[in-house]
Amino acid sequence: MKISTDWLKDFVDLKPPIPNHAEALTEAGLEVESIEKSASGDTVFQVEVTTNRPDWLSHWGVARELSAIHGMALLKPVIADEKKLSRTPPAGWKVIAKDSEACPYYTGILIEGITESKIPDFILRRLESCGLRSINLIVDITNYVLLELGQPLHAFDADKLVGKQILIRRARKSEKLILISGATIELNEQDLVIADSEKALALAGVMGGKESEVSALSKNIFLESAHFIPRPVRDSARRHLLSTDSSYRFERRVDPCLVDMARLRAIQLISEYAKPKTISGVICAGQKPNPIVAKIDLAQDFVTSTLGCDIKVNQISSALTRLGLEVRTVSSKAWKVTVPSFRADLTRPIDLVEEVARLYGFSNIPETLPTLLPGAVSMRPERRIQKKIREAMVGAGFNETVTFSLISKEGFADAELEAMVHLKNPLQAGLEWMRPSMLPSLLSVVHRNLRHGADSIALFEIANVYRRDSKKEVSEEKTIGFVLTGKARVGQWLDPSREAAYFDLKGVMQGVLKLSGLSSESWEPANSPGLSSSVSEKVSVENFLLGYAGQVSQSWLKLWDIQTPVFYGELRISPLSSAMMSKKVFREIPKYPAMERDLSMMVPEQVYCHQVIQDIQDAGGTLVQNIQLFDLFQGGRIPKGCKNFSFRVTYLSRDRTLTADEIDALHSKIAQVLATKYQAQFQSH
Amino acid sequence: MITDHISQIRAEAVLAIQQINSAAQAEAFRVQFLGKKSRLTGLFSFLKNVLPADKAVAGAEINTLKVWLQGSADELQVRFGAAAETASFFDSTLPGIIPPSGSTHLLTQTIEEVVSIFERMGFDIAEGPEVENTFHNFTALNVPEDHPARDPKDTFYTDQGNLLRTQTSTVQIRYMQSHKPPFRMIAPGRVYRPDTVDASHSFMFHQIEGLLVNSKVNFSELKGVLHLFLRELFGDKVKMRFRPHFFPFTEPSVEVDIEWKNKGWLEVLGAGLVDPNVFQAVGYDPQAVKGFAFGMGVERLAMLRHGIPDIRLFYENDLRFLRQFK
């Protein structure tokens, strides 16, 4: 909102330099975002008004704050003297508030025989300072009063009304209204309207209608000054996508006591500049509002203990009095504070403490530190494992991403969508679903980086994924997603480059599992959305699912316009963090040397590596400490349909030195078992 | 006799050693005195002709010489380096092989930095669900039933009637429901608001919110804690300003600005004393407990500290961006 400092000077004695006042307002909570000069040389504050302070949505309200800050006098705007005005309501006119809850107080006057239409300079200047366009004298005066006092007014051309009855009612279904803006809106039964005996004239508190609009030629007008409660105004404004200076204020609550004052201010300006022949007495509906909204007990002790600051009795009472509150002393350290209707935000003692603090100045409150608490606050396992994983991933050359949790349904089958969370009010198409996996988001990142020429992409993200269970309950789970594509190793002058393979990704995931202390997990083929049916598996420990991994399917790669093979995997964080909780206990370092023997064998292609390892372990027994596949060869001298495994077997005893003869014998026995089972052929070593 | 040979070889070797000043010469020494064609090898074959009675003594003497020569050669090699090390031309300008190293995301780094400062002050770090209900996101936080923030224009709702949290204050509510005061906690996480994405807005961003509850808590402590935090994050000389503001869940409420180079005051935090209505909502006695709460936007902090002009850079995850913040 724009505040003209020239206008403020009508009410408070603003001493230069003006920017100091901007700073004072900001420090009191009315943030001045910028200071501008208008064309007429006026200094204009652009202010940001918080929703709890609608009383600041006017020049007079801002002036009142300045008077409170500086402790200076606040002048009232010049208003018409009620005693000198007619008390006779316009003959035959009636105002009926059908909805007195939405419109508790409505007043109107009939102004007839307008003779002048020249707009005075100060009105033009000030409206321009505040960014308002001049329309005609009467409309400009209503806008002027709105900006000055914060009370929206509306003027109808009385000659364009049908009958002499003003109705405040809910609109009829499908009732039409052409707005001043020219747009035609279709109303519904929730819209509050001002109507004549025939049709809706205005959307109450939001905008007037074209047909009853006041023009420069209007001679007779009906001037409305009324109070509408926030809800219906906000609902109508939202429903019809309208935001006006009027609706903005009513939505936030206008002081109901301004109804009479604003009307008198408008009468004063209209009599002086429009020079009408007659101004009727007030015709109204509803009750005059109560000028008091609350009475609050306040004790000095409460103020000082809340702020942690020794504020004197007279500082407290002075601050509250300057704000326009009525402060009555109850005892030497306690007050009863009466809150006027323009400060409906003040209802409790704590609200008054804030007012005292604002005027006392937050900068004057000293700083202290709370004492330490006796209880232990240890790092939670979820956090510990995440830190550890991140460190390991960085060490492995992976870059962490942060991608949106919202995705499109692209790629997912209908059955999969059943278990996904859908938004009722998405911001835009393509961001309607909560992701059940990080694969779609990470593929987008892969696509973007490939397009920019990246040839080695290794990414991970730790975030939630979301699902709906069979009972339609939404669940979310912290998960780590991994993606790998391009080169596993970028070539250097010492080492050649190598393309990434699925087992690079799997190894990284196995490393992460090891980090958490999980061992003996099992991997088995399983299908997952987006992964190819041939290279895809799940990993679990004791039938408890940990995650899955595989090669991204051709159809998904196509959806994301990616040509290179991409490998993807996911692990749940919570089982990893529970595994981490078990303390690591020292195991004695072996006293006796280990012995190694290699086993190089040709087996049919369909033989699983894991099965062979299992067989070596079973045949070798407890002396087999470790089995490592160090070479896998196919093609060349190996016949078609076969492959050659090379294992290094480490033998170790924890209680004696092993002899070469003993191990050679055991090693041969293992070879024998494998030869029988797989028709394996051995190379001599 | 053989003893003479031994002393002669030793004397020659001593002389040779004195003249050696390169790895190549050291290697030549080894060949000359210990190689297959060396006189030492000759001595050993000469031993065959020695009388059996003298053999043991002579053998021991030759062996002593061999050990000495070997020790000398080794010492020379240590002193001048192995021949292989210097034999070929050393191009010191070849690039080193840098091991792979990735990066954590700048938002993670920022969260970690903030969170660990509060961790040092004894704050517990908690997380909560992103898919929430109106009680935790609004009602318990003293947001009125008809407040516009609840409108679908400002909050994402799921088909099931849940909402995506618009603030991490929800975690504070959950924490209060499951813990007894006194405590201090901080909650980082993702939040969602249906804002159109531009250089400074996103429909998803990150917040960190903190809460301290005890029987007696005052505003002066809030100031002390936040000032200490800002000193740790922005340096000991940071200048801060508390500006009155409005949040439904705190009273009094403030925004905290810091003075930033040539840009003047910039808002970095929202804070205040916990509104009694919030304590009421979680079943605490507002007469018996007090507290303060604060919150900050992670993206905003990161943008400010690292000079990042556009919030979208965080979510695009261009490797050329990510790798700048190793």
Image (spheres, rainbow, N blue to C red):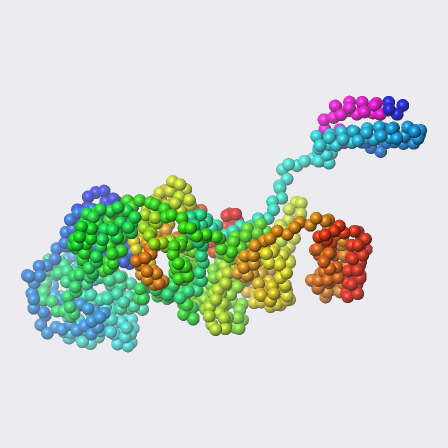
Q: Is residue A245 above or below residue B88?
A: below
Q: Position of residue A665 (x, y in %)?
A: 80, 56
**Count of numbered circles in the view:** 0
Q: Position of residue A157 (x, y in %)?
A: 17, 68
Q: Report the span colored magenta.
A: B5-27
Main SS type for the magenta part?
Answer: helix
- Residue B77 in sight from this viewpoint: yes
Q: Position of residue A323 (x, y in %)?
A: 20, 52
Which residue is rendered at x = 26% and y = 65% of the image? A230
**Viewer-proximal residue, B98 or A466?**
A466
Which residue is rendered at x = 77% and y = 60% of the image? A670
Q: Is residue A505 above or below residue B62?
A: below
Left or right placement of residue B133 versus residue B50 in this view: left
- Residue B265 in sight from this viewpoint: no
Q: Residue furthest left?
A: A84
Left or right placement of residue B27 versus residue A461 in this view: right
Which residue is rendered at x = 79% and y = 60% of the image? A669
Q: Is residue B245 above or below residue B35?
A: below
The answer to whether residue A294 is magenta is: no
Left or right placement of residue A141 versus residue B152 in this view: left
For the N terminus of chain A, the image quarter is bottom left
Residue A140 lies in quadrant: bottom left
Which residue is rendered at x = 17% and y = 73% of the image? A96
Left or right placement of residue B126 versus residue A337 in this view: right
The answer to whether residue B22 is magenta is: yes
Q: Position of residue B47 (x, y in %)?
A: 90, 30
**Viewer-proximal residue, A415 or A180?**
A415
